[in-house]
Amino acid sequence: MEDSEVIIQALAGLVDTEFVAKQLEQAFKDEILANASSEQVSDEEVMADVYQRVLLSPAVESLLTQEYELSVQMQDLVDEQEREWQYLTQRQTEEIQYAVDFLTEVEVNEVSVRHCEERQIFESGWESRLINVQETQRLHFREWLLGMAEIVETGGQLPIRPEDDFEHVPRNPENIDVETVFRLEESFTIQLGAQMKQTHNLRLISADVLDLCRLPLTTSNDPQRLQMALSLYSSNQSGLVLLVDDRLSAYTGMEKEFLRICRRGAELHFPRADLQLENARNTFSTNAFNWRQQISNRRICDVDLGSSLPKTKTPRLGDMYVSRHSNLAQVHVVFHLVSDDSIRSNEINSRHPVLLGLRHILRTAVVSDITTLTIPLLLVHELSEEMTVPWCLRRAELVFKCVKGFMMETASYGGGVDARGTGSSPTLQFLLPRDAADEVFHALAAMLPGVFRVSNPLVLRSDAAR
Amino acid sequence: MDLTVETNCSDILSNDSSKNSHNVGETLRKIYTNFRCRNPTPLDRGGLGVSTFCAANHPVESCGSNGLPLTPNSVQILGKFQTLSQLEHPNLCAYVDICRIQHERVIVVAEHYSTSLQTLILKKKIFGLDLQIHLARSIIEALQYLHSKNVVHRNFHSKNILISSEGRVKLSAYGMYYMTQSSTLVSFPIGYPKYLAPEVLLLGYDPSKSWFDNSTASDETLILYSSKPKSDIWSLGMILLEMALGIEFLSESRAKLCNTLRKVMSWIHAKGSAVERIIQEAEAVEQWKGVQLELKELIESCLQVHPENRPTADQLLKYPLFGERFSVPAAVFKFPAQSLPPDLLRIHHLMSKLPLSEVYHFWHLVGGDVEVELRKAGILRNKPAIFSLPCVVLEEGESFGQTKDRTTLFDDSVVEISLEALLRRLQHLPSSVFDPLVNDAGYILFDINDHPTLKEAAQLPLVIKEKDIDYQLYRIVMFDKQLQAYPLTRQAIVKEAREDVPPFCRARVWAALLKVDPSYPAVYAAIDKEKSHSSDRQIEVDIPRCHQYMDLLASPEGHAKFKRILKAWVNQHPQYVYWQGLDSLTAPFLLLHFNDEALAYACLAAFIPKYLNNFFWKDNSTVIQEYLAKFSHLVAFHDPVLRNHLDCIGFVPDLYAIPWFLTMFAHVFPLHKIFHLWDKLLLGNASFPLCIGLAVLQQLRESLLESGFNECILLFSDMPEIDIERCLKDSIEIFCSTPQSVTFRQHEPPSVSPKGNRSFWDFSLIGSNCMDDDEDIDTSSLAMDSIPIAVLRAERCPRISAEDFLELLDLNHKRFVRPKMVVVDVRNANKFQHGAVPGSINLPYQTCWTTDRTLIPCEQVEQLEKARGKIICVIGSSCNDLGLKLSEILLDLQWPRVCVLHKGFDVLLKTQILVVPAAVGMC
């Protein structure tokens, strides 16, 4: 539009200046700092800042001990709940057995109704108790942290605590040793790119996916805890891809197991894992559902094909939700990628929705500074009968190749390659189920350098003469 | 264009001078402007300012019309910025550098002053009329310059009008709108509401920029919707009005933003000029009355409602206000310069004459980092990444639940870089480093031996040397001086370049090494760069795959330049065709001369005939075959073990070395390595790349010797890491220990000078001092001839010319303390007795070896054994190939440095060196 034309139109009253003014105002307020509303730092961010300050101070040890104690408290509580639950189920089984054997049908029904009620009371009772403890813990931790930050700030004397007022002996079978998390492990350094090579680290591991999450409460000053705490708010986070079913139910399958693990540690930074799940479910049924409807409406308008409206409000194959955690062993961020039984087929190709989902995960990871990402190499967490050695090899090759493509694609998301050098090199971990045969592991370790180019070390020799 | 290597710039100069003495000055001035620093705006009393903003993200899953992923917007901005860095005007703050960091953020470095017009207005400084005129004139002149370069400012604000300590007016931030491609590459609006012209505001703002489709980026819609120069004139009027009244009007506060916008848009209802209305609304009628009449007239005309009624910047300068009454109010307008500790004044004075870009480069070398500066100032803050994760990501790629990150909002603050640390670091340097004496030919009269730290630095490895501030400063200042007097100083430049080439000067030094003719801009301008050509499609495909990790080469700006240069070359050389690889050859030059396309082209056009003569013929197989055959000979000559192994597994150079030589390694190494490689390559002659190839092979020698055919193929399918510095050292050694005729090629470019200086001017090697010329012999028969390609490929040992033979023989012991060569004569004993080369060993072919191809031990073989390591020249009879056969037996026995005398014994008959062996005796 010619400049003068706009003015002529405006003079003729054809331009809604009020609308334009509002639109511009919005743009300036949304995008320009000087016009934006004064900063409202979220509570989370304030805490993150305080947390990091304490973490980098001499109070770090107290901080880790604090976290450790709270986690132990949670764990004991959950253990107690599980014990009682077991006791309750046992008692009820005995009762029902007795009722079936000796009582009338009506009475049996009464007993089972009572049992049902008992179970509900048990669950809701424990639920509120756990939530209560969790909330108390959070408040306590927050106060403690702020107090500590002030002491650190003012250079005050750190409270000295008796060394052994709290001795926790690992007594739970779920407290696994870090060394044994990876049953097998092999690392590779690879390079991507034609002339300018970017270095990445790859690792092939065989482990139980949930062992990467389970917090080993062995000692209060576990170096891995410190490492995880330090990187929590940094730009070097760790992520994990967890394959789940489309129900996103807290009561079945992988999600149930995962939530159980989350519950056992004190989550002092982010919303509880079940709330994050709930939130994701809501997003799927509202925003995501609406978006999909719009898209398919548009498509129907474009072509009169029967591209049907999305019917369900549940996630589809290849969708994912992202959860954040501060109380897991080796991960901060979990990508819950929706998968189904089609993944067991031998016939899937690179256009399979789960692989597309994997691509989005890699992109999200790069954009969000997740520098260590663990991917289930076979796209399953458990091996079954039909997953033979050839099946495993074929699947691994597909995933290797796709991931290589995704990595090259995401290379451009980083900053420019200039005098600053190429920056840190991200790590990708390919995870094999713990029960994968050694033979498979070694075959895959041999396959990897064929797909990716393993870097040739530059050998510098001091003797130039030959 | 016929730019051969013989083109000598000084010749052109002297030719010119004979015709017209006036022309010399003209030409010289042109040369100076051609080979000077990128943007020579000196540091002076200014400083450097850093600002930053984020480019808009592309929507997920979008791709361009060619199906490739879209270029990140930040990369596009980098490309657009380059034009801005070329702008120079006394009233503009020069743009110095731009860089791109994570999350699509770019950081801009520009000249900066701490005082702005806004600070003056806020301080209620009273502007005298002279001052007002000075300000107005300076701004308009800057604007006129910008408009002449097709740059629309749009970002006017009184805080973007800076004033130096001597009172010079400098516009800043004028490039925002340009580098963001009319703000389409960012998500924020550019400009300040109260200064924007009503027609700009009336167009409204569509945050999604739906009118602009990035994938089809059509220029028409862009031009239609972007602001025009006339909008700048309005903003100018507003600025001048504020200045004249000495007040700021229209609030910029958040609460009154909408009101401000409404008001500006309502001004269109004024008749003619909006100024009366503005004055009334600002309640400044009284002050307006006091404004000088001619200034009033100027402001009035700027604030015309209809853009076409506003004058252009050109017209404004002719207004009566700027008539003869005008005088520069130098005295009126001075602020105390930034206070420096007195001990730094000397070094600051020395530095102030250096170009800004150079000062910035040095600041980098002492550890300056723009990102850190911004962080220190709190402009760049990172929200922990874990808070910006999405909640849900769909299989389609759409994500939900991400909160807008406040840290990505546009902040127009500028952070001033403190140069104090740099100055302190350089304080110990003597003034002579900053202004070294040079003689007329450009040779430096500064003795590095007087400065132990510099001398020490000169010995360091290349990559460390390039980071050494003292050394770099000394080198850069010196090269600057020499380059200014190019081409007169070319020899001096070559001499210094042999030492090393500082990265900062590389672009210009390379042009000098390639003897680029100073008239190159005209040459390039005359070439048709648009004409369609059969190779267009291939060029189109190759460019987006060529060294795209370099942001500049990946930007649309870079692609356009790339295409023009390639097409220019193809169109200009009808005898040649476009071979894939030409793109890789162009990349280093384009990157170095990104802002001087013509020079990039000129370098390319000079490079190809020098190193790749005839390689770009439509049928280049003979040229390449000859090259590879010579390469094989060279490998055999220096490393028979490797050669025999590679032969044995069938791994011939045809399988790996074609891309090496066709692109002079530009396809196989990343550009930062190519720079170091070519720094030396450009000093060598056309045969030097063969030596580099051998040095590369030798660095991988161990893996090659251990590998079979398949492993070798795999090894070279992606070039392994190579230590370039060592590779270059090795290749120079190889070059110096190789007789010239060994690498003689039929297709090598015609040598620069016929004789006397046969060996190349840039390296000293065997044969640089020619043999005595007093003997009157016909040397042409002693030279190397071209050999049919089939013969060349069949032979496994190289031939040596009689000319080189005689030099190496060194009968008078003039050149070498110890003989470099041992001669093996394979003719039968009878012929040998009749006449032979002095000192030669007679190993008659028929009798000297057994059927299992080993030499029969005898006195002569022992003698030969003692000479292992020296060049072994086998002489056969001219009428059979027994010499060649024996040389191949020696090669099979892993004898190094075996060669055969070209044309055999008879060629020596005329040379009068032959003796009867009995007379020589045994040595």
Image (cartoon, helix red, strand yellow):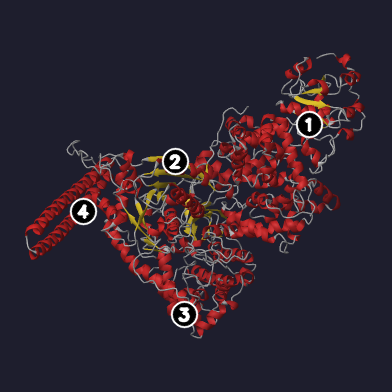
Q: CA distance from mark 2 to mark 1?
A: 60 Å
Q: Are marks 1 and 4 on the same chain?
A: no
Q: CA distance from mark 3 to mark 4?
A: 59 Å
SS class of the residue under badge 3? helix
Amino acid at the residue labelled 4 = Gln
Decide: few, some or many residues near mark 1? Use Cα within 10 Å; few <14, some 14-19, many ≥20: some
Nearest to the eye among marks 2 and 3: give it: 2
Residue B706 coordinates in the image, percent (x, y): 59, 32
Amino acid at the residue labelled 2 = His
Residue B728 coordinates in the image, percent (x, y): 65, 36
Residue B626: tell me if it is visible.
yes
Q: Is residue A2 left or right of residue B392?
A: right
Mark number, residue A134: 4
Q: Are marks 2 and 1 on the same chain?
A: no
Residue B283: tell me if it is visible.
no
Q: Residue at x 34, y 59 (%)?
A: A245
**Rendered view: B37 above or below A294:** above
Amino acid at the residue labelled 3 = Ser
**Rendered view: B843 above or below A81:** above
Residue B591 coordinates in the image, percent (x, y): 63, 51
Nearest to the eye among marks 1 and 3: give it: 1
Q: Nearer the viewer, residue B173 or A115?
A: A115
Which residue lies under the disc numbered 3? B266
Decide: few, some or many residues near mark 2? Use Cα within 10 Å; few <14, some 14-19, many ≥20: some
Amino acid at the residue labelled 1 = Ser
Residue B919 coordinates in the image, percent (x, y): 89, 14
Which residue lies under the disc numbered 1? B768
- Report the quarter where the C terminus of chain B lies: top right
Mark number, residue B154: none
